[in-house]
């Protein structure tokens, strides 16, 4: 019985460690003002919009579907995605998602060249 208890405890500690290593939890959507408004597909017109979910990154001009994710030791998350912009299918690209230096509750999304696309907060 004690061995079973130790095994369960070790599994819980391992799972908690993996969750912390992942660093960024996308189980709930993040977005800017218009991204959060549009998270359920309302299609409210906005020139600037950023919505980040566990499966995709959506902007006013494109939709990117994630195919791979890699947690980094620094707590950031690198995702590989295939993006479509206004009906045109693009090449796979990578985005880096990390905590904002200004506000730890927000995330910063940058493209593979390091250009910051925007800062997003958890949608309410």
Image: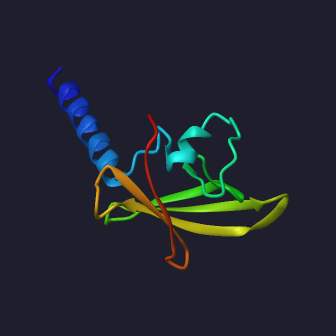
User: Would you place residue 41 above or below residue 91 in this image?
Assistant: above
The x and y percentages for residue 112 are 55, 75
User: Would you place residue 76 above or below residue 124 in this image?
Assistant: below
Q: Residue at x 28, y 62 (%)?
A: 102
Drawn side of residue 100 relative to residue 58, left or right:
left
Quadrant the N terminus occupies: top left
Q: Residue at x 71, y 58 (%)?
A: 62
Residue 48 found in image quarter = bottom right
The x and y percentages for residue 74 are 31, 66
Residue extending farthest to the right is: 87
Residue extending farthest to the left is: 2
Residue extending farthest to the top is: 1
User: Would you place residue 1 above or below residue 69 in this image?
Assistant: above
Q: How many marks?
A: 0
The x and y percentages for residue 116 are 49, 70
Drawn side of residue 61 relative to residue 18, left or right:
right
Is residue 80 in sight in this rendering?
Answer: yes
Foreground residue among 88 and 42: 42
The x and y percentages for residue 31 are 50, 48
Q: Residue at x 32, y 41 (%)?
A: 15
């Amino acid at each position: 019985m004690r061995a079973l208890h130790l095994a369960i405890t070790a599994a819980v500690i391992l799972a908690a460690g993996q969750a912390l290593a992942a660093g960024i939890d996308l189980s709930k959507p993040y977005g800017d003002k218009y991204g959060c408004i549009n998270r359920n597909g309302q299609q409210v017109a906005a020139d600037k919009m950023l919505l980040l979910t566990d499966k995709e990154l959506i902007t006013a001009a494109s939709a990117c579907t994630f195919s791979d994710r890699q947690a980094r030791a620094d707590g950031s998350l690198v995702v590989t995605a295939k993006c479509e912009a206004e009906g045109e299918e693009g090449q796979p690209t990578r985005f880096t998602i990390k905590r904002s230096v200004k506000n730890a509750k927000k995330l910063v999304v940058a493209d593979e060249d390091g250009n910051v696309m925007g800062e997003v907060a958890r949608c309410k």
